[in-house]
Amino acid sequence: MRIDGSMARRSKMWVFLQFPLTRIVIAVVALTTLVGAIQVCAQALGVAPHSTASVFVAMLMMLATLAVYAGFVRLIERRRVSELGLNGAALEFGSGFGIGAFLFALTMVVLYALGQVDITMAGGWEVLGLPLLDALIAAVTEEVLMRGVLFRIVEGSLGSWIALVFSAALFGALHGFNPGATLTSSIAIALEAGVLLAAVFMYTRRLWMVIGLHTAWNFTEG
């Protein structure tokens, strides 16, 4: 049987697109370019942080991130986007949020009992909204990239343990660029957050619970 040249080229292109590293690069470039473009446009338009306009920008950024990831899965991987299925999403997000808030509150209780921190009240309930939105933005963008793209694709190619070690180490390293970060803090983030978040994703095979946990941790910490 003779194979048409154009069909052979399409077949080679399909094999190339399905290579794990190729898929990671396509997804990372698409997502980071999108987020960067939205941020640049917001700055060019003079959108002030924590303003009404910034709330719309934040919502756009989150929705665009989820849409681009879903498009990547459908167009490149040619499968259903099961990790973002809406059935049970609210319950999973809420469960993750509750777990994350409990874990960080427990951490603070231990530190308080050891005399390492002082807890004081400041502001009011009205100051909670924007920090919560900031935490949600970080959780959505980071979890789509770290667990939805990197961990999932590496796991499918090299196995769960390698994916767990790789994603946790990279997660800690990326947080080394945060203000006030140290080598110790980066290692701690890799060991507790990187491993925990990957484990939650491995358990649910969906992104909602891990996004909820990540959001709560960032929010309660802030």
Image: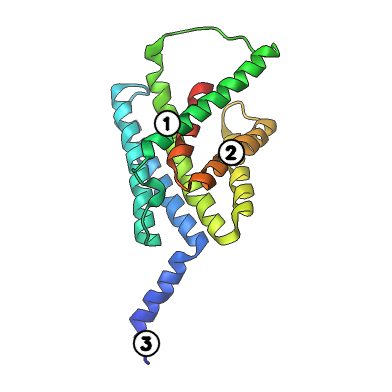
Furthest-bottom residue in view? 1
Question: Picture coordinates of residue 194 (x, y %)?
Answer: 59, 40
Write down the quadrant of residue 188 in the picture: top right
Res. 146 visible in picture:
no
Residue corresponding to mark 2: 196
The mark lying in front, picked from 3 and 2, is 2
For the residues bearing labels 3 and 2, Cβ distance under 8 angstroms: no
Q: Which secondary structure, mark 2? A: helix
Does 189 sit left or right of 143 as displayed? right
Residue 59 percent across, percent down from the top left: 32, 33
Q: Which residue is mark 3?
A: 3
Q: Is residue 164 above or below residue 197?
A: below
The residue positioned 48% from the left and 56% from the top of the image is 25
Q: Nearer the viewer, mark 2 or mark 1?
A: 1
Residue placed at 46% from the left, 50% from the top?
Answer: 28
Query: Where is residue 126 shown, x and y percent of the image?
Result: 37, 13
| Residue indicated by mark 1 | 94
Measured in 3D between alpha carbons, the distance from the residue under mark 3 to the one under mark 2, in whole angstroms, is: 49 Å
Q: Is residue 143 left or right of residue 5?
A: right
Q: Nearer the viewer, residue 42 or 70?
A: 70
Residue 118 occupies which quadrant of the picture? top right
- The alpha-carbon separation of the residues under discs 3 and 1 comes to 53 Å
User: How would you rate the neighbour count of disc 1 (Cα within 10 Å): few for under 14, some for 14-19, many for 20 or more?
Assistant: some
Q: In the rendered view, tell whether residue 18 sits above or below residue 141.
A: below
> Is the residue under label 1 in contact with that under label 2 (CB below 8 Å)?
no
How many residues crowd mark 2 within 10 Å: few (<14), some (14–19), many (20+)?
some
What amino acid type is highlighted by mark number 3? Ile
Question: Residue at horizontal 46%, vertical 38%?
Answer: 209
What label sits on residue 105 in the rendered view? none
Question: Rounded to the nearest whole Å, what is the CA distance between mark 2 and mark 1?
Answer: 17 Å
